[in-house]
Image (tube, rainbow, N blue to C red):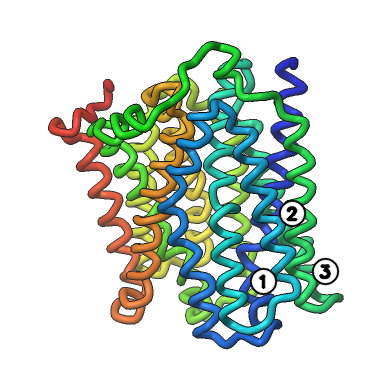
């Protein structure tokens, strides 16, 4: 498969997969409400599935052991699609919660497995990972907007069918992707001992912790920025534009990342992301004017996207090819699972007590990340 056809196939898969997430993230609570669930039940249905992120390393190890990430992605996506179809006819809190847990168990691993596959295969085939990954962000925005427009005309119960349709397209697109190259390259099959050995690599875990702290510092932003801006008197349309600026900035960064950041070390990229995040959260804590907020939202390209690119580069260069999926899974469990979940859980009490000043706590998380990056004990010097 040529580099161009590989990039096109992977871009199509990213577009379909992230379209599903683009409908799910803002609108699945609306679907739950339409199914008759109350606020407390909805919060439980949204929070509990996050716990399955701690199991993502299992799926990554399965892909490494089989040397076939594409197959594991297809199985996970297929079972998640079946669970989603069962949700269509579910009613009542407990059946819906049970099916959402099953759905999340198989759907959650698809993103880190895809990232691991994309990073590894892009490097092997000479493709530009950033330019491929950008289609995930673009499709997320497009699906979010399209679903919003459609819901002005159709019942909220159509939200789940929209998500499932995107998942079905993503499942079809998997057939366009080439097989995992590790088997053809003679990469050894990963064993349990290999995976446990990875977990004993302190410098790898500390780097992932440093990057994970920066990403988890967005927890308050994801949970309460809209609430805070609304309390300041911002209109819903302005809040939507502010969110869009952040995602657009992220998208632009991914498009130019290889050309702009290609020679930077992973540690330097995460350091830059952490510094930008500190500045962003400190300034947001003091309720800046709207004109400044547009600049702070554009800094999402640094606090999120630069950190993400540095982490992907680190996993590719520091984790053995035989354990690429496991490494990605460990990072997902640590960052998107444990750290982000804790940050989001803490955001409620912090915001209730401090209001916008709670962003200073998020800045503190990034300062802790910087301390890890410079930690001699963790062997995380910038030259590493």
Q: Would you identify the image quadrant in which residue 337 lies?
A: bottom left
Report the side of 371 relative to 255 (left or right).
left
Q: Residue at x 44, y 46 (%)?
A: 332
First reached walking from the N terminus: tag 1 or tag 2: 2
Relative to 5, say whether 338 is above or below.
below
Q: Which element carries disc 2, helix, strand or loop?
A: helix
Of the pair 90 and 244, the residue shown nearer to us: 90
Give me the C-alpha separation between circle 1 and circle 2.
Answer: 16 Å
Tell me if residue 62 comes above or below residue 319 in the rendering.
below
Which image quarter is the C terminus in? top left
Chain-order first, disc 2 or disc 3? 2
Marks 2/3: CA–CA distance: 12 Å
> Residue sitting at 48 percent across and 49 percent down?
299
Q: Is residue 338 left or right of residue 109?
A: left
Q: Which mark is residue 237?
A: 1
Q: Mark 3 to mark 1: distance in Å?
A: 17 Å
Q: Nearer the viewer, mark 1 or mark 2?
A: 2
Q: Residues within 10 Å of mark 2 (few under 14, many from 20)?
A: some
Quadrant for residue 350, please give it: bottom left
Residue 321, horizontal then vertical, whole percent: 46, 22
Looking at the image, which residue is at 37% across and 70% down?
345
Q: Is residue 343 above or below residue 311?
A: below
Residue occupied by mark 3: 150
Q: Residue furthest right?
A: 153
Residue matched to label 2: 142
Q: Is residue 71 above or below residue 345?
A: above
Towards the viewer: 356 or 333: 333
Could you say which quadrant of the image residue 238 lies in?
bottom right
Crowd band around label 3 with a 10 angstrom C-alpha radius: few (<14), some (14–19), many (20+): some
CB atoms at circles 3 and 1 under 8 Å apart? no
Residue nearer the viewer, 179 or 163: 179
């Amino acid at each position: 498969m040529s580099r161009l056809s590989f990039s096109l196939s992977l871009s199509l898969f990213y577009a379909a997969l992230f379209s599903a997430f683009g409908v799910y993230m803002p609108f699945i609570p609306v679907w739950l409400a339409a199914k008759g669930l109350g606020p407390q039940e909805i919060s439980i249905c949204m929070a509990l599935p996050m716990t399955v992120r701690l199991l993502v390393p299992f799926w990554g190890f399965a892909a490494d052991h089989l040397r076939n990430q594409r197959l594991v992605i297809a199985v996970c996506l297929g079972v998640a699609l079946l669970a989603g179809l069962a949700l269509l006819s579910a009613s009542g809190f407990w059946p819906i919660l049970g099916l959402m847990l099953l759905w999340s168990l198989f759907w959650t691993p698809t993103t880190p497995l895809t990232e691991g596959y994309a990073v590894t295969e892009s490097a092997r085939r000479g493709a530009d990972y950033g330019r491929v990954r950008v289609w995930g962000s673009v499709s997320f925005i497009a699906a979010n907007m399209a679903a919003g427009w459609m819901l002005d005309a159709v019942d909220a119960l159509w939200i789940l069918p929209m998500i499932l349709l995107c998942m079905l397209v993503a499942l079809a697109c998997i057939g366009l992707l080439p097989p995992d190259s590790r088997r053809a390259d003679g990469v050894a099959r990963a064993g349990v001992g290999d995976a446990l050995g990875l977990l004993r690599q302190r410098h790898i875990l500390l780097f992932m912790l440093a990057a994970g702290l920066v990403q988890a510092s967005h927890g308050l932003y994801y949970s309460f920025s809209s609430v805070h801006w609304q309390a300041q008197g911002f209109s819903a349309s302005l809040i939507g534009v502010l969110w869009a600026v952040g995602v657009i900035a992220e998208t632009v960064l991914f498009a130019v990342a290889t050309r702009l950041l290609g020679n930077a070390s992973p540690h330097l990229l995460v350091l830059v992301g952490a510094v930008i995040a500190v500045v962003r959260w400190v300034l947001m804590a003091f309720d800046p004017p709207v004109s400044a907020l547009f600049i702070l939202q554009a800094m999402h390209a640094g606090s999120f996207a630069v950190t993400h690119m540095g982490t992907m580069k680190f996993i590719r260069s520091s984790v053995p090819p035989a354990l690429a999926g496991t490494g990605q899974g460990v990072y997902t469990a640590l960052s998107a699972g444990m750290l982000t979940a804790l940050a989001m859980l803490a955001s409620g009490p912090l915001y209730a007590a401090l209001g916008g000043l709670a962003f200073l706590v998020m800045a503190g998380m990034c300062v802790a990340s910087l301390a890890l990056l410079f930690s001699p004990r963790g062997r995380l010097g910038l030259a590493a």
